[in-house]
Amino acid sequence: MDFIWQAGKPFLKDIIECYPDPKPATTTIATLLKRLHEKGVVDYETFGNSRRYFPLIKKEAYFSNQMSGMIKQFFNDSTLQFASFFTSSANLSDKELEGLKNIVDQELKKRNDD
């Protein structure tokens, strides 16, 4: 998906080319694109026997959806459990933990101001 967002409207051959050697099989990438199409994440335009793919969802929305699914699956749909696991398991520095605290404080302030 990153390559599709960056490239805009790549063909299958362009997507395969973005991978380092050894490149995945064409059928592997085609299957992945088919699944993304079925999920409504990408669509394509047909040019003869070729398809040019393009994203139907913005990167931020896709990432948010993926994170929500992960939190639901691995953390009993609890963002608090995820945050606890992340902060204790990610080996964050004191500076990074302070940064996270500042982000939370800013979000709380923004919500209280509304």
Image (cartoon, rainbow, N blue to C red):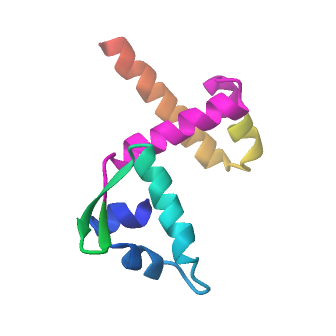
Residue 55 point in image, percent of width and height? 32, 54
Q: Residue at x 73, y 36 (%)?
A: 85
Q: Quadrant of the C terminus?
A: top left
Asked if the magenta segment contains residue 65, the reply would be yes
Against 110, residue 68 (above or below) is: below
Viewer-proximal residue among 84 and 44: 44
Against 18, residue 53 (above or below) is: above
In the image as oriented, which residue stretches furthest toward the right?
Answer: 89
Quadrant of the image occupied by residue 73: top right
Q: Residue at x 58, y 39 (%)?
A: 98
Residue 8 point in image, percent of width and height? 27, 64
In the image as oriented, which residue stretches furthest toward the bottom?
Answer: 21
Asked if the magenta segment contains residue 25, the reply would be no
Q: Quadrant of the N terminus?
A: bottom left
Q: Main secondary structure of the magenta part?
A: helix
Residue 40 point in image, percent of width and height? 38, 43
Quadrant of the image occupied by residue 14: bottom left
Viewer-proximal residue among 17 and 26: 26
Span colored in magenta: 54-83
Q: Residue at x 48, y 26 (%)?
A: 105
Q: Tally the marks.
A: 0
Residue 72 point in image, percent of width and height? 64, 28
Q: Residue at x 57, y 68 (%)?
A: 28
In the image as oriented, which residue stretches furthest toward the front?
Answer: 48
Against 108, residue 101 (above or below) is: below
Viewer-proximal residue among 95 and 38: 38
